[in-house]
Amino acid sequence: MKKVLITGAAGFLGSHLTDRFLKEGYYVIGMDNFITGDKKNIKHLEHNPNFEFIEYDVTKHISIDGGLDYILHFASPASPIDYLKIPIQTLKVGSLGTHNLLGLAKAKRSRILIASTSEIYGDPLVHPQTEDYYGNVNTIGPRGVYDEAKRFQESITMAYNRFHGLETRIVRIFNTYGPKMRLNDGRVIPAFMGQALRGEDLTIFGDGSQTRSFCYVDDQVEGIYRLLLSDYDHPVNIGNPHEISIKDFAEEIIKLTGTSQKVIYKDLPVNDPMQRQPDISLAKKLLGWEPKVNRAEGMKITYDYFKSLTEEELYKSEHKDFSNYTTK
């Protein structure tokens, strides 16, 4: 039985990847410090003999007994509401955490896949974004803590690949959604759906002309799985290229939820990207991958998940407490 370590295993994508690798017959070691992850995402696995969980901060030295075939590094805050509140931890997990995991992969002779992001493109001047575009990022802006952590993460990963001959894979993840997202995630889908469920007006930042491209989580996981098992060691975009403006998306949410809320407008955050659309030509060519789940189907599944939350979860969703981490 092959063994895989997944960091951020209690997070949104990490927990879905954990389920996928268990389904494929792997022994999975999950690791998370729950700074943004949620124990309920992996609670169903507590009696699974092929799953082992370690509560741990990957920015500290990592030791794992026995061999490891694969490592997937998904430990990181991944939404603005998180990384603006815990900027130092965001930088540390992308730098120190990645360094530790690359060292572990070298020691174990494991293949390692690093979760990068479309945010390395910043507010892009090229549209759609291809893997050979270097990006347009403000290094000292409030979003830079995430963008630059991920850009450094890619650089050190390729350094280990070239200098040590380490087997590495880099996935650039575009907006992904589905069950297990947090309502206090801060990204547009849980924000809109949470507001609709609470009877609040939907909040758009800016004039709503900015665009996003949303990929359902099952499609994202399939792309990541194929990339890990491929022979390609440079970054690959995995996302859904079907683009929509935030204003039009808000109207879709109102129609889906059957609510009568208004749309209200607030100032656009600093350096918020105006366009986000992946060019997935490389993923199609290398992996034979493209998204299968259309937005209407995926949004219905996601909305049904959010509707299943308890009233306490729904109304406390805006109060994630980072007080234990803010001074570290």
Image: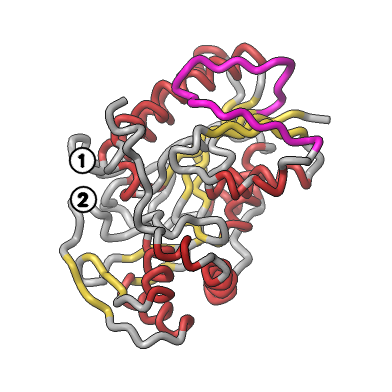
Mark 2–mark 1 distance (CA, rounded to whole Å) = 7 Å
Dot 2 corresponds to which residue? 271
Q: State which quadrant residue 139 falls in.
A: top left
Dot 1 corresponds to which residue? 138
- Under mark 2, the amino acid is Asn
Magenta span covers which residues?
Answer: 49-70
Residue at x 70%, y 47% (from the top left corner): 19
- Under mark 1, the amino acid is Asn
Side (left or right) of 75 relative to 212: right
Q: Is residue 88 above or below residue 126?
A: above
Question: Is residue 132 magenta-colored?
Answer: no
The C terminus lies in quadrant: top left
Is the stretch drawn in magenta largely helix, strand or loop? loop
Residue at x 60%, y 15% (from the top left corner): 63
Q: Circle 2 — which element?
A: loop
Q: Position of residue 75 (x, y in %)?
A: 49, 35
Q: Is residue 194 above or below residue 104?
A: below
Q: Position of residue 161 (x, y in %)?
A: 53, 21
Side (left or right) of 54 relative to 88: right
